Image: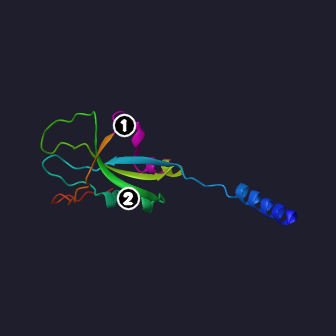
């Protein structure tokens, strides 16, 4: 009986040591969606996620937001502060930066999460990368 308990304990200990949890460090990146005041337009969350995916960056989650603590001129046609935010693996950060995305942590005042609008390209000028 002792031998059986010893074998079971040894098996349990070796299993505990070999089952390391592999946690993937994640980082949030953002890109301005290109929408213009009074006009709208810009890139949808799906379009920017697809851009990352096409270049080998796995998108874990996505959301939309507005940059905090920054002012823009209030004029039709001027840029908005709306951004598309994607959570990716930290190991893909350099790829995302090369595609024009920036780490969300770089924004001093962060963002306010918003609903993702259903955006349609402005007539005569499709938004794209």
Residue 120 position, x and y percent, is: 20, 60
Q: What residue did someone put label 2 on?
A: 49
Residue lying at 22% horizontally and 50% vertically, measured from the top left:
35
Q: What residue did someone put label 1 on?
A: 107
Residue lying at 22% horizontally and 33% vertically, measured from the top left:
71
Picture quarter with the C terminus: bottom left
In this view, the residue in front, 68 or 43, is: 68
Q: Where 120 sits versus 81, above or below?
A: below
- Residue 10 quadrant: bottom right
User: Marks 2 and 1: in contact by CB < 8 Å?
Assistant: no
Residue 111 position, x and y percent, is: 31, 41
- Residue 9 quadrant: bottom right
Residue 103 position, x and y percent, is: 42, 43
In this view, the residue in front, 21 or 99, is: 21
Q: Which residues are magenta?
A: 94-110
- Determine which of the numbered discs, if any, sits on residue 66 in the image: none
* Residue 7 in sight from this viewpoint: yes
Picture quarter with the N terminus: bottom right
Q: Where 5 sits versus 27, above or below?
A: below
Q: Where 64 sits versus 15, above or below?
A: above
């Amino acid at each position: 009986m002792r031998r059986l308990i010893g074998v079971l304990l040894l098996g349990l200990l070796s299993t505990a040591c070999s089952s390391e949890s592999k946690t993937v460090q994640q980082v949030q990146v953002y890109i301005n969606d290109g929408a213009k005041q009074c006009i709208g337009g810009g890139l949808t969350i799906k379009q920017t996620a697809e851009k990352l995916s096409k270049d080998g960056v796995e998108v874990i989650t996505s959301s939309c937001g507005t940059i905090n603590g920054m002012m823009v001129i209030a004029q039709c046609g001027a840029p908005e502060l709306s951004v598309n935010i994607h959570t990716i693996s930290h190991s893909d950060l350099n790829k995302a930066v090369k595609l024009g995305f920036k780490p969300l942590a770089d924004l001093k005042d962060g963002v306010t999460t918003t609903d993702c609008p259903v955006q349609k390209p402005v007539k005569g000028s499709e938004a794209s990368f």
